[in-house]
Amino acid sequence: MSPEKHVLTPQVLVVGAGSAGTAAAIAAAETGADTLLVEASGHIGGTLARQLLEHSAGFHDAAGNQVTGGIGQRIIALLQEYGGSPGHIPDDVKYTATRTPVNHAELSMCEAILLRRAGVRLLLNTVVVAAQTAEGEQGKRVTAVVVESAALGRALIRPEVVVDCSGDAVVFALAGASFQTDRLRSTQPASLLLKLGGVDYGSLLTYASDNADDFRPGSRIGTPTDEHVNLWGFGRLLEQGHREGRLSWRRTELHLAGWPRRAEAVLNLTRTPIDPAGSRLGDTYLTLAEQVMQTVAWFRRYVPGGSDAYLADVADRVGVRESRRIKGITTLREEDVRSGRRSPDSIGQAAFPIDVHASDAPGLSHTDGLTAAYDIPYGILVGHDHDNLLAAGRCVSSTHEANGSARITATCFTTGEAAGTAAALAVRHRTNPRRLDVEQLQAALRQRAVIGAR
């Protein structure tokens, strides 16, 4: 089927329905733009919902001050109404001030509810395959995005503004945009999270209490009657499993996010290097699948309370921490993050530690806490080469180190909301995102309860 047989003309096209894309689409539609959201999978929620992330993080700074509001907070509030999250609770390991446990399936449904209420049009199972460009006022302009799906076949979408929230900056790549080139060989590794059922938390937490030195210092171990527990440790059991040939890769600690009353636990343990372009994700999945099954067998054999555990769920996608990062008109740098730098064109704030996982070592490369929140400049969302192309989520314009903080889900909600609002305002004022009056954008974001839009 030729593209011309199906031509769609939304004012704003958002690609990717993860945390950033969901926020971008809701914001664009609520700001008055006819908005189409395109998602390659059959689900809403992206990495947070479908990669089974242990919890959302980054809503508060080290002192407990909230830095993420707006749509991110609205999603959590709706999820609390339905009983799918306790909201923001203290972090048991004090890595951050708070964490926000979520029921993954219910999160996805709540995001879908907000999309519907905003009037967003949605195409699922729809893959972006090409981008058409032409010369614009200040650079190139994306004139059309080609997509394919079983329902439409090949279709042409002609938007006024595109917001790329695909994680891998797919539209930017197809449009021939520029990317950051720092430390490509040190791209953070990929993982495949898994959920266990049938965990005996009485035995597991007794072991943790009796072996507190094998867990992060200052950790609150919790009790079997708690709704949630959060543990980083089990290093000695992991070393024993590796030494005895049960685990084919080395890890120094396991992150276990547990729901004791449900006897469930999400485990973050698997890990393998990944190429920056993500061109071998299929092979990566095959490697991680074997690690998943080794993890389940190790847990049953070595972890007290794990003998009756079973594999309840596996993430539906490889968890990618870092891939392409766009070149924007501004780049967020490590020193901006560490210093808590203020920016006159701030569209929100972030405060999660610089969290960098080593691709070639059994532990984290480093985690560096922040003493204060930093501003997110509007320019990191705006493509360097194209007039009408915005980014949000983990692919924003940032250095490798800065991305270790900015990639977190709460910050993705913030950058997504800002990008979607900017896209809609550009349409309304018949301009392009580069020429948008940032003060107008900041005023709109403040009305939307975004924190730190100056």
Image: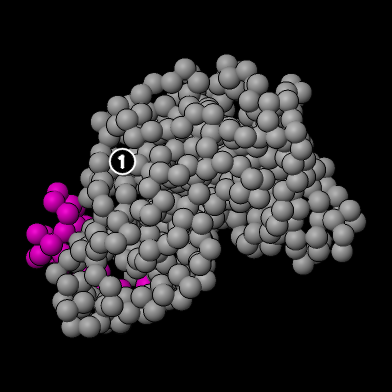
**Which quadrant holds residue 52?**
bottom left
In the image, residue 453 lies at what x, y percent? 49, 23
Residue at 24% of width from left, 70% of height from top? Answer: 250
* Residue 99 vertical placement versus 285 (above, below): above
In the image, residue 97 lies at what x, y percent? 28, 40
On the question of residue 269 being in view, the answer is: yes
> Front-most of 271 and 75?
271
Crowding near the residue tagged with mark 1, few <14, some 14–19, many ≥20 C-alpha atoms within 10 Å: many
In the image, residue 139 lies at what x, y percent? 68, 30
Residue at 51% of width from left, 60% of height from top? Answer: 278
For disc 1, the marked residue is 353
Relative to 303, 425 lies left or right: right
> Front-most of 301 and 377?
377
Q: Amino acid at mark 1?
A: Pro
In magenta stretch: residue 169: no
- Secondary structure at badge 1 equals loop
Which residues lie in the magenta part?
Answer: 196-225
